[in-house]
Image: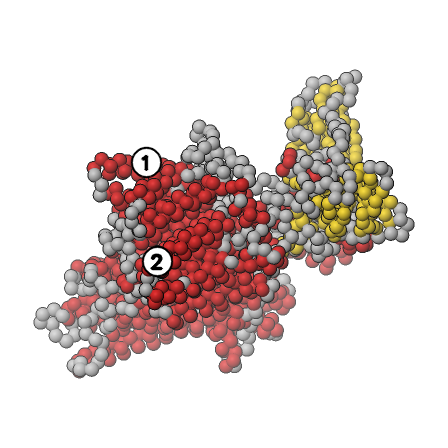
Amino acid sequence: MNSLSQNPGTTAGQPPAASGHRLIVISLALCSLILAWVGMTVIGRSDPWYRNLDMNIHNVVDALSINSSVTPNPFAQPAVPLKYLLALDYRVRHELGVLPVWNMKKFGAAADPLLEYSPLVRAGRLQQRILILVFILCAAGLSYTVTREINAACLTVILLCGSSGLLFHGLLLRPELMCVGFGNVLALLCAWRATASVTWGRKQAWLFLAGLFVGLSVLEKLPGVFYLAVCYAWCWLAAVIAVREAPATAPEDGRAGYWSGLLPAASGVLVLWLVFQLGANHPALSAVAVQRLRGAALLVAVLPLLGLWRGGHRGARFLLERVRELGLLGAGALAALPLVYLLFRAVMTEPSASKYFAGVLHFVINPGPEMKLLLSAKPDAAREFLVAFREAPFLFLSAPALALAVLWVRAIPLRLKALLVLLLATALGLTLLMGRRHFFAQYSIFPHVPLLLVWSLGLTALGTWGRRQPGAGGVHWSVPVAFAAAVILALTAYLRLQPKYTFYQDDVSLPVNDLTLTFLFDHDAHPGPYLQTMRDHYGDRQQFTQNLQRYLADPANRY
Amino acid sequence: MDIFLAHCLVLLWMCLGAARPLAAHAADRLLAAALLAWGNVVATCLLLSTVNRLGHPGWFFSTSGLLAGLTCLLLLRFRPAADPTALPAGPTGPGVNPRLWFAFIVTIAPLALAGFGVAYTQHPDSPDALAYQLPRALYYLGQNSLAHFDATDPRQVWRPFNDSLLRLLALVYHTPLPVLNFFNLAAWALSGGAVYRLCRLCAVGANASLLTSWLVLTATPVIASAASITIELPAGAALLGALVFGLQWWQTQRASDAALAGLAVGLAAGSSLNILLFCSGAGLLFGIRAYRQGRSEPVARTDGSRRMWIMPALLAGAAGAPFALINLAEAGRASGPGFGATLFRLLGDAPPHASTGPWPLFAGTAHFPVLTVDTVNFGFTGALFLLCAFLCLWRFRQSAGPVGWFAGLGLGWILVIYSLQKWILPNAPDFVPGVLLLSPCVAATIEANQVSRTLPRLAGRLILLVVVLAAAWSAGRYLLRNPGRPFTFLSSIAAPPPAWPALPLLVKYRLANQAHLNVDTDGVDECIFPFLALGSTERFTSSHTTIPAAYNLLSRAGDSRNAAYLNTGRLPSYALLSIPDKRSAGVEFLGRVGAGAASRDYFGLESQAGRTASLDSNRTLLITIYPETAGNGPGHRARLTVAGLNAEDQLWLAANLENVDGTVTSLAAIKADGATPVAISQPFKQLVFRAHDNATQKEMGAAAIPYNSLPVAKAGPVDLARPTSDSSLFVIDGLQTDKSGPVTVKGLLPVEGPFPQWDLPFLRWQRQPAATIRISATGRLARLQVSFSVRLHVRNQGGLDVVFNGERIQHYRIEDRTTWLDQTLELTPRPGENVLEFKDAPIIKEQDWMDYLERYPDVMKHVVTNHLPLEQGAREHYEQHGRAEGRILQMTEKPEPTPGAFYFMYRHLRLEGFKSP
């Protein structure tokens, strides 16, 4: 069972009313996208480039470093795909002739590097806005894959376009957007496709891909590892539902036993090659990290051996199949490491890429020491949860209520109900997880996205159910209502986004505060060549401050 | 390590792919894949040996991977995957009872985890592994081929080598040593699956087969071999593979089963002489039976069966015979002294053994013995297996079923092992193949017991219950409470406990970082592997000829030093010839390991010794004389080897025979290291070796080896603990004890020695910056006298401060690493406790940047504000401004860096306290 709808999602033979409805919802979705883009652009236009420098400037400087084969210093969170994309973006813009400074060498050679910040930060923000649109479209793809309803996809677009938690990330360069995008959207999409696939080849390819996206999510931000549990939980739920719905399943394809193990084995071998490549010459990769990577590589490569046993008790076979799925997910997640390393090798020299990746791996694989510094010693889960709740109380209350309503309707497929429960659990779990530190404004994306997906999927399910009720004809009355509510949400997004962003960080006023100066001039996480460039151009901190104040005195230089 | 793991994964999956067309069942596939992988390693070694690339990891990985890939592709291309439903695999009765299956997993999983923990943390420690299996593999890697090398221990070159080649897979990648244990652990797991399959193929039910598999896995001889290094378990697993596929061939006539059986036989026989003998005997019986059967069969069918066995026979020969072919090519005979010793041990003396009888559960004599690899034995499980074997022999005496064969084979194995040991209990690993062979008998008996009458069934179940409980207890106790190889939780591994006795520090220091180490030993059964596993040495060779490019480790029996030519132990004799004016480095005495007759002396010779200046400790030649024929009386040829004599010394060595009548016969004039054959024709007084200067012919040194043992009065050591006057209150010899009376010594390593060659009875190392002597409050103590003799060893210069009660009373600067500093100091103690310290003193002066920053707060502010590293910021400021401004920069002293923390070496440390006269 692939979809909520029992009808194929084609337009052939549909009545004109349905086509008109389709046109309306697609138009609404497009309008929402445009509205979201405009909202973000308007806010961004009046936003000085020196705001939110804690992450902006690190990502910008690291992207410049990557383009010069200078090793960035891993700091606080990996954000590896983000930096890589930013570096690529700078390269492309340079090739197009719109960005003269695209690497550290050019930055150092600039007459006044201060002048270069603004276009670099602007380019980064533009990239984030584009990623927001891609994110929304992918989420729509997830909704469509689950329901096979264009309504669900469009509703997802409109709802996400109204999410201040999501649009917030179009205004600054932070890793949370891609972490959620990879983990909660793409990985879940692949996991869904895997469990819906009939052939073992597709199933394992989708599962591997799901793992790969989880790996990329972890490389973006550590909480991404939570999505591995989400995907694996979905494998269990789907399998239990499949057994319940069709106890006498068809005999398994005998080829799967061996061939399905090759992908994890290859992944394990690649990870071992990576450890060999990095382990010998880079002390940043600690013994603990090396040991864990080796253990994980061996585990994912050996777990599929269990697939050789195809006979035996039904329960044992069920468990073995779940273990194999875990192996595939893990293999995909691990494969992200050599894949990303090879991507870096394509744009950096071997020593720089290896040194950088050794630092990243050390942080990702052995995060304990860093986490001790970052996490609260005595986390107050209730207080932090309330912080998250206060930002979107309606969403937090309505999504579970909607899910309960869906659960109550017997006719709605069990798979969809299970997915809604899983999304609720994801939102709740990530809110609690992010509350281990302090629930900052930028973390809203973690609960908002799954809760909004619950909304779109739940409403679509109820709408489809209502349409099939005796006496119902054409479009159910609830559909326009739902769309109207969603459009209102999208229209009011700006009103929620603007204050959220304005109150995010108090660093807009002049003269700039000490922290901003540090981020710009001499933060110890910046790579050596950047610090040297700044010293060469501006001497000491005091001289730099004077230069910066002089530069920002002209309002034209602030944006 | 990573490439090793990657290689294992590649082998595993490629061989599994290749096994798909060959075997249908999961256990069979795993077994076939393991056999193919082992065969792949053997083939890789043979191929690389022919092109002298055996020790190159890159070649090894690529060749093995290529072979595995080709095998996989060929088999997948030309054979469809085996269909499990097409094979008549055993009886068609019900499968395993889920509860029994659950119990199996619940009990075996902890044992497997415990075995994993032990294998992961413990170094290999079985005597055979340390004496010849592992050194042999390292020497093969060092010389890049499987050719013979100079070895006194014949097992290192003559024995079948497939097991050593298997370990070579790990050694070629310089993996941590515990990894070597995992081959046995894998063999243990495979044995469990193979036993199950074997029993099933013998038409035994699934439950009885699983129970038998459990009994085999928990049998003490098997579990003792699981986390260690023994040949018998991997070879036994291969033997089981041969039986599984042989039996399968018997039932299906599939050529692939015969081929796998042939490969397995070759691998097993190419690993162990015992199995080679066994396979030869079993093969002969099988041949006779086949011949007799062939005479009564139609000609066409017989011809088909014969042709089918051509490929298996070729595979068996290819996997099992290379060692014999190499022996043949190297020495003109296929077997060495090891084979003869095994084959004809019946005629010789039986080896001593600690066992007290043929049926002990544990070979020790204690009331409640501690289980170690040496004390485990056949156990209750073994007794049950023997009982079942006899029952099956009786039960199947009329039928031609396979269970009766296995009873005969297993009992035959045990009988042969016992008889080879002259009816004294063999070691535990020797039982392993017997246990494996008898397993179908146990399964058949268990199954037969299920359908017998009530009383015998209850009795059988009771016996089984007792054996199961005893086996579980023994296996758990062996893995978890084994003092020799203690189990450690993986999460709590900090520093694995040492598995070997400590080596002398000088040996460790000298051998730790050599690029190439050449071993020249005259020891048979010498535990040499710990010397080869000390550090990052990349290449090991074994040669009786000194290799100038390598660090040469020379090992001689302790009792052969200055031993008479006619010594009762039939040992070679060696003498040290000291040459005080020797120009280049000679042999250096490194230390003695062991005591009594088993003791061995170790010497080292630097690489490129001729181009290395000599030190006090290595101005010596090592002269060894080996009788070349049995006995070492007159009328025999002998071989004279010299080590440490370099052309740069401008010396030559005269080897003369002083006859009884006073005349002198010149034997040889030797100008450089090497072996010289000499003829000794009559009884003589002594062999005299004199070193002469090439230019002046002046004698530079001499040594002698007497013909007969002469009583030599040994001078006893000076008793340093004797008081020197009546007013003495206490005396302590700090070299011999750490605590005596009121005095406590801390900070020195345990005493080493004696080293009479260097006039060095004992020594102690100070491997930390300070050593402390505390003298607790002693009434009437008025004067202290401390005398010591100390030197550097690693550093070329250093400083020593003698500090008494916190006050530095003497500072010494030592400018040469070989010079002894001998001092005696008189000290005046204070009432109460007195503390005397020997401290490493700073001698290098350098700028004190911290003082600079503390002295000038403005500089500190500047450095902190600019987020500069403190030392770097201070230096930059001083260079740019401070020097011109005339700011003060204090100098501070630092001690000389000490590689390996070898601070000082003491040969004498004595403290005596006196009262007022």
Question: Furthest-front residue in view?
Answer: B295
Query: Which coloring applies here?
Result: secondary structure
Residue at horizontal 82 percent and vertical 50 percent from the top: B669
The kind of secondary structure element at disc 2 is: helix
- The residue nearer to you, when weighing A466 against B463, is B463
Q: Residues within 10 Å of mark 2 (few under 14, many from 20)?
A: few
Which residue is disc 2 drawn over? Answer: B293
Left or right position of A402 against A202: left
Q: Amino acid at mark 2?
A: Gln
Residue at horizontal 25 percent and vertical 66 percent from the top: A457
Q: Image quadrant of residue A179?
A: bottom left
Which residue is disc 1 drawn over? Answer: B466
Is disc 1 in the same subunit as disc 2?
yes
Q: Image quadrant of residue B461?
A: top left
Q: Please determine whether, in this image, residue B731 is positioned above or below residue A29.
A: above
Residue at horizontal 42 percent and vertical 70 percent from the top: B74
CA distance separating discs 1 and 2: 43 Å
Left or right position of B74 against B343: left
Q: Position of residue B686 (x, y in %)?
A: 79, 39
